[in-house]
Amino acid sequence: MRFGLSRPTNSKPLPIHSDVGQALSYEEKLRLIRTAAKRPEWLNARLAMVLALNTTMRGCEIKGLCWRCVDFMDRNVTVRRTSTKTDKGQRLIPLNVHAWNAILELWDRAKLVGGVEPDHFVFPACENGNVDPNRPMKSWRSAWRTLTRVIECPGCRRLQDPGQTCVNPKCQCDIRDLKSTLAGLRFHDMRHQAITELAESEASDQTILSIAGHVSREMLEHYSHIRVETKGHAVEALGRTTAPEKSYVTSNVTIDVLADEADPQVTEKNGRGERI
């Protein structure tokens, strides 16, 4: 007789989740950036999104970031592994202009609540309007879900949650069939987006690993495929005789277009008069 654990006849195997995330098109990324700036309740989600898109940081790493990890002189952040108190596994990430502006906006906000000590969290906890910089923010999940599901009425262009009819009493347009193209987008996909753009920029696997930290073999193979595909498009462009169609662009181009095309209600400035 054999002794051991047997699987119940009605049990199902656990689902296997792919580590490969969702990448955004040019239009989707631009819409996400523009939309995130339209409601004050999306502030934390927006600033966290900017950091993730421009540093490859995970959501847990952003929430665990303390001011002692931010180097204001050299404009970089040190990301430490949350599972260990040693320096093993930590990585240094330079801050580009977009990530730097987000850090400055967070610093200005921290000064207002006295949360600028080295051990204070960049994204402090806030309950019932009381900010505690000694504890990290738990989540921006609700704001992220609303941000990615929100739709725009085709009649009056009003931004609103999905529903049956437009919330504008003067419009009342039928919106029951409208769905955001960003619905279902995970915050973790911002990290995937950033690494995808690194791969498209011809960054080596070693460079990607030094910035993004641990990346699974499946993901590295995926990004290597992106790199090869990008080279193929570049070679094809050598013989092109017509103007190329606008397709995918990197973070820098996206933000530049946003600054040029956004209306005054969308474009924001931080306390130093610099655009984010």
Image (spheres, rainbow, N blue to C red):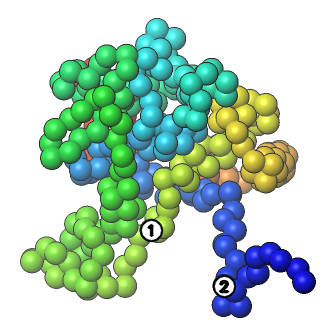
Position of 268 with respect to 182 (left or right) is left
Residue 103 seen in the figure: yes
Where residue 122 sits, quadrant-wise, is top left
Please, which residue is most extreme toward the top here?
Answer: 73
Please, which residue is most extreme toward the left here?
Answer: 169
Residue type at mark 2 is Ser
Q: Identify the image quadrant of the N terminus.
A: bottom right
Mark carried by residue 11: 2
- Which of 58/46 is in front? 58
Residues under numbered marks 2 and 1 in contact, where contact means CB atoms less than 8 Å apart: no
Mark carried by residue 217: none
Please, which residue is most extreme toward the bottom here?
Answer: 9
- The total number of labels drawn is 2
Tell me if residue 49 comes above or below residue 65 in the rendering. Answer: below
Please, which residue is most extreme toward the right here?
Answer: 1
Residue 233 seen in the figure: no
In x, y percent, where is residue 164? 25, 85
Secondary structure of residue under mark 2: loop
Position of 254 with respect to 108 (left or right) is right
Check disc 1 and report the residue beneath it.
183
Q: Please rate how many residues cluster around mark 2, counting C-alpha atoms within 10 Å: few if below 14, some from 14 to 19, many from 20.
A: few
In x, y percent, where is residue 78? 55, 22
In x, y percent, where is residue 263? 28, 47
The mark that comes first in sequence, 2 or 1, is 2
User: For the point 24% across and 33% down, which residue is it?
Assistant: 132
